[in-house]
Amino acid sequence: MTCQNCGNESPAGNSTCPYCGAVGDEPADRKHKVFVHKTVNLEAGRPVVEVAMNRCREVIDDAIRNKINVITFIHGYGSSGKGGVIRSECRQALLFMKSKKIISDYIAGEDFNKRSGRVRALLQRYSQLVKDRNLNQGNQGITLVIVF
């Protein structure tokens, strides 16, 4: 049986997916869930914070409408060495969106490594992310958004 939510195979007869916890039966015609991952550079063109944040919200709205699973936002780290404004504003907005259940979760680039339980669960759900070039790199200039 293939889970409708995450696309992972689970033993027949299980009503709950052992990978993502989704409950329900699968339609007979469904073979696997399509995985869509989009990368968006929020700092392209050196926008002011408001423009970058509008772009962030537009991309998330588009991802929800078009069933995109994961978005990687490139927001940079900032030239100050303390983290850039776009980075901090983006992560604050994502925290708010997570609390309102607009997005499922987000993972800071510096935490995107196989040692993290949240990342291991994400990799089980979307095994294609194992090949992501940012995995285990500690990249503070990106954030992954798990849409749903």
Image (cartoon, rainbow, N blue to C red):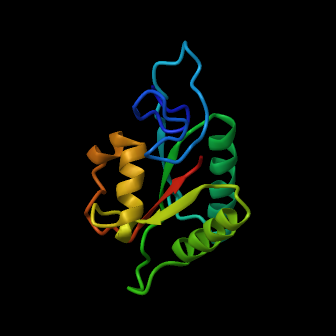
* Residue in the foreground of this view, choosing between 92 and 79: 92
For this orientation, the residue located farthest to the top is: 29
- The residue drawn where x is 27% and y is 51% is 133
| Residue 128 placement: quadrant | top left
100 relative position to 71: left or right: right
From this view, report whether residue 135 is shown above or below residue 1: below
Give above or below for 139 relative to 128: below
Q: Quadrant of residue 85?
A: bottom right
Q: Locate residue 8 relative to residue 89 in the image: left or right.
A: left
Choose between 22 and 49: the one closer to the eye: 22
| Residue 53 drawn above or below residue 131 | below
- Which quadrant, please, contains the N terminus? top left
Image coordinates of residue 118 in percent, x first then y, are: 42, 62
**Is 71 in front, or is 27?**
27
- x and y, in percent, of residue 100 in the image: 74, 63
- Residue under the point 52% across and 72% down: 87
Residue found at x 42% / y 52%? 122
- Seen at 40% across and 68% down, the residue is 141
Residue 2: x and y in percent read 46, 28
Please state the horizontal and vertical placement of residue 90, each as a whole percent of the image. Answer: 59, 68
